[in-house]
Amino acid sequence: MDWSFPQIYFLQSSVCLSVILRACSEHGKMAISQHFICLLIIILISSLPGGVDGCDGYYNSVADQCRFSSPDLSYLEYVRSYWFNKAPYIVFNSTVGKFVGYTEFGIYNAEAWNTDTAMVAQMRAQKDAYCRPNAQIEINNILTQTAEPVVKLKLGKASIGGQSAILVCSAYDFYPKMIKLTWYRDGKEVTGDVISSEELADGDWYYQIHSHLEFTPKAGEKISCMVEHSSLKEPLVVHWDPSMPRPEKTKIAVGVAALVLGFIVMVAGFIYYERSSRVSVSGANVKKKPVLWGLNVDTAHKGMKSALWWLNSVTMRCDETPVKTPVK
């Protein structure tokens, strides 16, 4: 037996009501509040227009789509699809201009709906009445916006024993998706030994991309990565600095600071000793025995060691490479 679309909705509503009524009747000893909840659910379902969209694991859904491929909306298409349990059974496409069925039930209803000229005309009009103004709003509010990329150039693999090294040029948080990364060595474009990923979506409208250059280091050469994107007024060029990496520079700077601080602590200990080693005897200043100097030097050394230990812990925290705890 063939069913029309309203009949399917009515059938689903009846099934849902029967399931709820049976559940309520099987619990005759329920509290008054539970009976009231059952009655309220029945009233709400009965008042829904056209029945319910799902019951007992079966679902009906309708989706409207506006498809376009350019900001001028030269290609615009309206699509309405009817789904049952995540499978489409009837689709209207403004380009085709009629309903198309994909199942036996869908084909039957599509043929019936296509005979209704008023309904078909109304669906065709949705392209200009619904899609065009809403698509223009989306273009103005979203697609015309841009976000400049954040570019980082780092050494992915260092050259050891004459082996080739790998540079990584990464661009983060840019929009729209289209972007171009180009490598240059001494002003000449590099076409080989380059591996680039696709634009990777972050899931929040932003994208990222990574390009790898394999090369053998040469003294005095200049390597750069050029990024071209619609958000940039001119291409962004980032040059590779073959000097000591920033973490190593930070370690050296902190180490020098530790030595200076240690020297200051030692001098302060010496000054303190000189002042405390003088005592007043009958109005004259007399020095204590020199053996005490060794004790104060030891104290100064301990203070310097404590300062160096503290600065060494700071140096470890300044390192950009995190120390991971082995998984047992």
Image (cartoon, grey):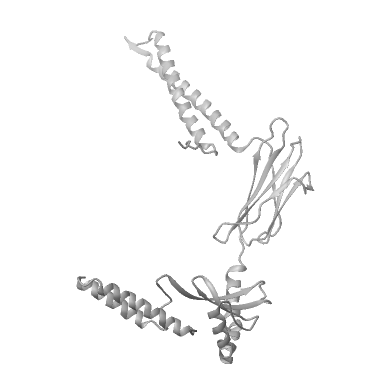
Q: Residue at x 43, y 20 (%)?
A: 302
| Above or below, comparing residue 225 to residue 84 in the picture | above
Q: Residue at x 47, y 32 (%)?
A: 313
Q: Is residue 195 visible?
A: yes
Q: Quadrant of residue 293?
A: top left
How many marks the image carries: the answer is 0
Q: Quadrant of residue 124?
A: bottom right
Q: Residue at x 37, y 17 (%)?
A: 276
Name the side, left or right, on which 19 lies relative to 195. Answer: left
Can you give x and y, in whole percent of width and height, for residue 203 in the image?
Answer: 55, 59
Can you give x and y, in whole percent of width and height, for residue 158 in the image?
Answer: 67, 36
Q: In the depicted view, which residue is nearer to us: 79 or 285?
A: 79
Q: In the depicted view, which residue is nearer to us: 129 or 89?
A: 89
Q: Residue furthest front?
A: 1
Quadrant occupied by the C terminus? top left
Can you give x and y, in whole percent of width and height, for residue 298 in the image?
Answer: 43, 16
Q: In the depicted view, which residue is nearer to us: 25 or 246?
A: 25
| Above or below, comparing residue 100 to residue 140 in the picture | below
Can you give x and y, in whole percent of width and height, for residue 248 in the image?
Answer: 59, 34
Q: Is residue 274 visible?
A: no
